[in-house]
Image (cartoon, helix red, strand yellow):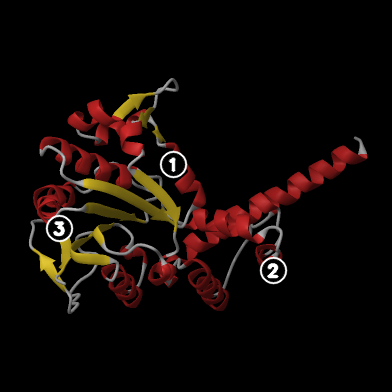
């Protein structure tokens, strides 16, 4: 065996062994959880320690780091930190999503939010928070575009999707999805907005894509973001990953991004007994939504 081959085998063995026996105690977990929340706004509850260990182990294996100290130093490296932080956050962020995920919330938008917006006139601005790979943002765009078509236009609109994961946002911009995701889209929208691709999947039509944009956003930076005077803020399946105190901070911040009459749509059961002096609860079956009153 040549020296080069031996070195390659050694590196491969080291990579496979990296993180295999990783164990972190409660003190180490608290430090990593604090680091992740401070850096990226990602909250990991103590009961999800095994989830954090799995994520760290996966990245250590990929980078060949033998222990947590070495991996931490890599995260601080000027040449590697931006990319590695992005990859770690992507590993620790759940991207499970689908088109038209919560039918009742979509009906609320169609039956109450959009008619009220048409009555107000102007531009309709919708925001998909933690949009992952884009299915939610495109679902909102399909709903809004079809509503405008049925009602003879009268509403200029745009949808913004934000997420902390750069790989997820890259896929969202490409707007290419596997065939199995097509079943989640109502037939009327499939025919109008979905195009077959050579690889067997489908893509989103250009008429819709030009209405949707995507940007990276850490929810810790909402106050400094350009998301202001929104007519719709759609934030579902995100708050469940945070404790109540952080949930309240997030929702209070999102409410400040709404314009008068704007609606914040959350996942049912994600936040109980929230009150805000400028928000009123929207009554609609199997939904959790609030309207800004001024």
Q: Residue 113, relative to residue 187: is it above or below? A: below
Viewer-proximal residue among 29 and 267: 267
Q: Report x, y in % for residue 58.
A: 58, 53
The residue sitting at 43% across, 65% down in the picture is 48
For this view, does 20 lie left or right of residue 44?
right
Q: Position of residue 10 (x, y in %)?
A: 81, 46
Give the Cα separation between the discs numbered 1 and 2.
Answer: 36 Å
Say which label, 1 or 2, has the lower sequence index.
2
For mark 1, what is the residue? 173
User: Which residue is found at the position 42% from the left and 55% from the top?
Assistant: 163
The image shows residue 110 at horizontal and vertical percentages of 13, 47
Q: Position of residue 79 (x, y in %)?
A: 71, 59
Q: Quadrant of the N terminus?
A: top right
Mark 3: few/some/many CA within 10 Å (<14, 14-19, 20+): many
Q: Which sits in the foreground, 256 or 284?
A: 256
| Earlier sequence position, callout 1 versus callout 3 | 1
Badge 1 local density, few (<14 within 10 Å), some, or many (20+)?
some
Label 3 element class: loop
Q: CA distance from mark 1 to mark 3?
A: 29 Å
Residue 95: tell me if it is visible.
no
On residue 287, which mark appears? Answer: 3
Tell me if residue 46 comes above or below residue 3 in the rendering: below
SS category of the residue bearing label 1: helix
- Does residue 294 appear in this view? yes
Give the residue number, with chain letter if any, for mark 2. 69
Q: Nearer the viewer, mark 1 or mark 2?
A: 1
């Amino acid at each position: 065996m040549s020296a080069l081959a031996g070195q390659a085998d050694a590196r491969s063995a080291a990579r496979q062994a990296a993180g295999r026996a990783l164990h972190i105690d409660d003190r180490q977990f608290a430090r990593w959880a604090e680091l992740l929340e401070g850096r990226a706004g990602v909250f990991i509850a103590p009961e999800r320690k095994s989830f954090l260990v799995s994520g760290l182990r996966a990245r250590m294996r990929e980078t060949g780091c033998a222990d947590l100290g070495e991996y931490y130093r890599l995260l601080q490296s000027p040449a590697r930190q931006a990319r590695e932080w992005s990859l770690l956050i992507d590993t620790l962020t759940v991207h499970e999503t689908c088109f038209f995920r919560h039918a009742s919330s979509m009906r609320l938008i169609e039956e109450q939010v959009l008619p009220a917006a048409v009555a107000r006139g102007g531009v309709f601005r919708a925001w998909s928070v933690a949009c992952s790979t884009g299915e939610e943002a495109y679902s909102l765009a399909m709903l809004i575009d079809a509503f405008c078509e049925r009602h003879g236009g009268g509403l200029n609109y745009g949808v913004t999707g934000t997420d902390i994961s750069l790989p997820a946002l890259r896929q969202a911009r490409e707007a290419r999805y596997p065939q199995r995701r097509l079943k989640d889209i109502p037939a009327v929208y499939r025919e109008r907005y979905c195009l077959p691709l050579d690889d067997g999947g489908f893509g989103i039509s250009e008429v819709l894509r030009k209405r949707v944009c995507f940007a990276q956003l850490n929810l810790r930076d909402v106050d400094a973001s350009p998301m202001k005077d929104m007519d719709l803020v759609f934030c579902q399946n995100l708050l469940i990953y945070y404790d109540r105190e952080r949930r309240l901070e997030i929702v209070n911040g999102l409410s400040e991004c709404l314009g008068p009459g704007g609606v914040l749509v959350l996942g049912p059961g994600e936040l109980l007994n929230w009150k805000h002096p400028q928000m009123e609860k929207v009554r609609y079956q199997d939904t959790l939504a609030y309207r800004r009153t001024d």
